[in-house]
Amino acid sequence: DVQLVESGGGLVQPGGSLRLSCAASGFTFSNYSMNWVRQAPGKGLEWISYISSSSSAVFNADSMKGRFAISRDNAKNSLYLQMSSLTAEDTAVYYCVRVLVVPNAFGYFDLWGRGTLVTVSS
Amino acid sequence: EIVMTQSPATLSVSPGERAILSCRASQSVRTNLAWYQQKPGQAPRLLIYGASTRATGFPARFSGSGSGTEFTLTISSLQSEDFAIYYCQQYNNWYSFGRGTKLEIK
């Protein structure tokens, strides 16, 4: 099956750090750009970070203020999100998302994982 | 940043009736617009891309239209499984999502 499976979520104290992982299967991971998207409880969707297929291009949403770092290991079919200086506002479900790139645009999100919940609380 | 505005926030429609959801971009996104469906406890699922192309697995009662700054998602005859939250997203200049429209049973 074509799927993305996130892991690494949990309870973390304010100011702490956490590393999320996403395992891809059923497709050639190294051919696709990837993103992280999050959703706070009862709220909408927020794009976090983008990484190109070869890791040559990495971009973060300005709102993350440099606290989050996306990376990937194509040999392991895995995507990562390193998060630091976490606050209660970072409490959310974090989704790993595959991008279908289109000409002259950034591409749409054609495959989503089920998400992993990160709770920032003391 | 391109701001996406969806309306209405909540839409109450009876099964079998038609639903029309709107999405407006703060600047032109051409046809680089996607719609996603999200049901409770589930991840979003790609519904429409390129403003009007239906993704795999969705029936023909779902249709998208528009270009530039004004977009519409129409569900022609609502079935019980269609009641969900729908998000629009532009991918013309990075990514931004609307706040969603909750489609509920009337």
Image: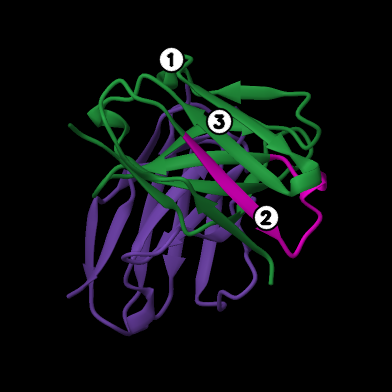
The amino acid at mark 2 is Ala
State how far apart marks 1 and 3 are (Cα): 11 Å
Horizontal side, residue A7 vs residue A79: left or right: left
Q: Nearer the viewer, residue B95 or A67?
A: A67
Q: Nearer the viewer, residue B18 or B94?
A: B94
Q: Colour of chain A?
A: green
Residue located at (52% from left, 29% from top): A82
The amino acid at mark 3 is Ser
Is any atom of residue B78 visible in this view?
A: no
Chain bearing tag 3 is A
Q: Colour of chain B?
A: purple
Q: Quadrant of residue B40?
A: bottom left
The amino acid at mark 1 is Lys
Q: Which residue is mark 1?
A: A65
Q: Is residue A19 above or below residue A45?
A: above
Q: Nearer the viewer, residue A107 or A47?
A: A47
The circle on residue A49 is 3
The C terminus of chain B, quarter of image: bottom left
Relative image position of residue B95 (x, y in whole percent):
54, 34
N-terminal of the pair, mark 2 or mark 1, is 2
State how far apart marks 2 and 3 are (Cα): 17 Å
Query: Quick one: SS at disc 1?
Result: loop
State how far apart marks 2 and 1 are (Cα): 27 Å
Relative image position of residue B52 (x, y in whole percent):
60, 57
Circles 1 and 3 on the same subunit = yes
Q: Which residue is mark 2?
A: A24
Residue located at (56% from left, 57% from top): A5
Q: Quadrant of residue B13?
A: bottom left
Mark 3 and mark 2 in contact (Cβ < 8 Å)? Answer: no
Q: Read off the magenta span.
A: A19-33
